[in-house]
Every structure is written in structure tokens, then in C-alpha cells.
Image (spheres, helix red, strand yellow):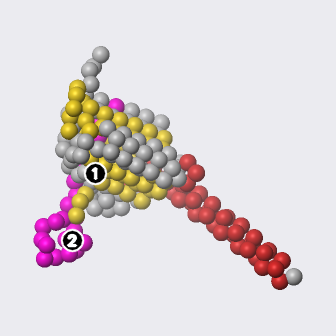
Amino acid sequence: MKNKQWHLMNVIRYFVHAALRIIRRNYRNYKCYVSTGVLPRGGGAVFFDSKNITIGNNFSMGVDCKFYAQDKDAKILIGDNVALNDNVTINSDLGGSIEIGSNTIIGPGVVMRASNHNLDNTLKPFREQGHKSGIIKVGDNVLLGANVIVLPNVVIGENVVIGAGSVVTKDIPDNYLAFGMPATVHRRIPNE
């Protein structure tokens, strides 16, 4: 008899926890939808302070994407027809700004962070030195390959392809293929 009671309690506990997860996910999705007009698929995205995030029409994303815009001056602007693959992180915290142009494709595992830690004094712990905010601008019709990292104060022009695994530390002009660590321009993409 005791085993049956124990088993019944575990089943009830499982269903209560499952129901709470669904309620939390739906509430988070509702808040995100009200702020941005985007409904995360299956709860697979997290929007931190979605009131600072603007998303254009025909936006799609995979699972486990994260958007950070928690500071009052932080902002994320995403154009129309933008597609994000799984596990993309877009972080404009600490007063940063990230703008992504229309018709852009962002591969899995891409990280965009618009601020960095101050590294001005080795006598003081780095975690206590604060941050330097910056901007990231990505033009229209850009393709960022898998696991690309885009650092602060970078402008990626229009019609640009960034190869997988690249680290973008400097501006990339319009109509170029760039890759590497750090990413460098390798060839022009023709306008035909």
C-alpha cells in the first residue's frame, strides 16, 4: 500500500511541476508577445527586458535564443525578414545598442555583445572595473555563419557573408566575404 501511495504522490508531483513550467513559459511568452509582437516557439527563447527590443515583420528563430536589453539605455533593433537559428545570443546590456538589418540570416551559436569589461587597472579586480558600452550594426542582407562572435563597436556592411567560427573585431565593408580570427576581408561578392 505504501508503494502505491508513494508512486501516486510522485505522479501528482510530476504533473504539478509540468503544469507550473507550462504556465511560466506561457506567461513569459505572453509578456514577450505584448512587447515585441514575437511569440517564441515552444518557449525556446528568453527576452530580458523586451520593452527595449524592437522586431520587424516576418521574424523567425530557433530554440534557446537569448536577447538581453536590461539597461534603460540598452536597445536591440531587428529589421524585417530576419531569421535566427538555434542558440543565438544578442546582448546589448549596459547601455549598448545592436541593430540588425532586414533580410539577415544568423547561424546557430552566434554571439553579439555590445559591451566589454573595462581592463584598465590590474590592481583592481576586473569584475569591479565596470563595463564600456558600444554599438553593433549589421546591414541588410547579411549572413553570419555558425558560431560567429561579433564584438562591440563593429559595423558590418550590406550584402556581407561572415564565415563560420569567425570573430568580428573591426568593420567589414559592403559586398564582401570575411572570415577568420579576427575576421578579415577575403573577396568581393559581385553585384550581378
Instruction: Please identify the quadrant where the C terminus is shown.
Output: top left
In percent of width and height, residue 137 lies at 26, 43
**Corner quadrant of residue 118:** bottom left
Q: Nearer the viewer, residue 62 or 80?
A: 62
Q: How many marks?
A: 2
Instruction: Please identify the quadrant where the N terminus is shown.
Output: bottom right
Q: Residue at x 78, y 75 (%)?
A: 7
Q: Residue at x 70, y 69 (%)?
A: 14
Q: Residue at x 53, y 53 (%)?
A: 44
Disc number placed over residue 12 in the picture, else none = none
Above/below status of 150 relative to 10: above
- Residue stretch in magenta: 118-141
Work out whether mark 1 precedes mark 2 in sequence or the reverse, and give the earlier one: 1
Which is closer to the viewer, label 1 or label 2?
2
* 123 part of magenta stretch: yes
Q: Which residue is mark 1?
A: 97
Q: Which residue is mark 2?
A: 126
Q: Residue at x 42, y 45 (%)?
A: 108
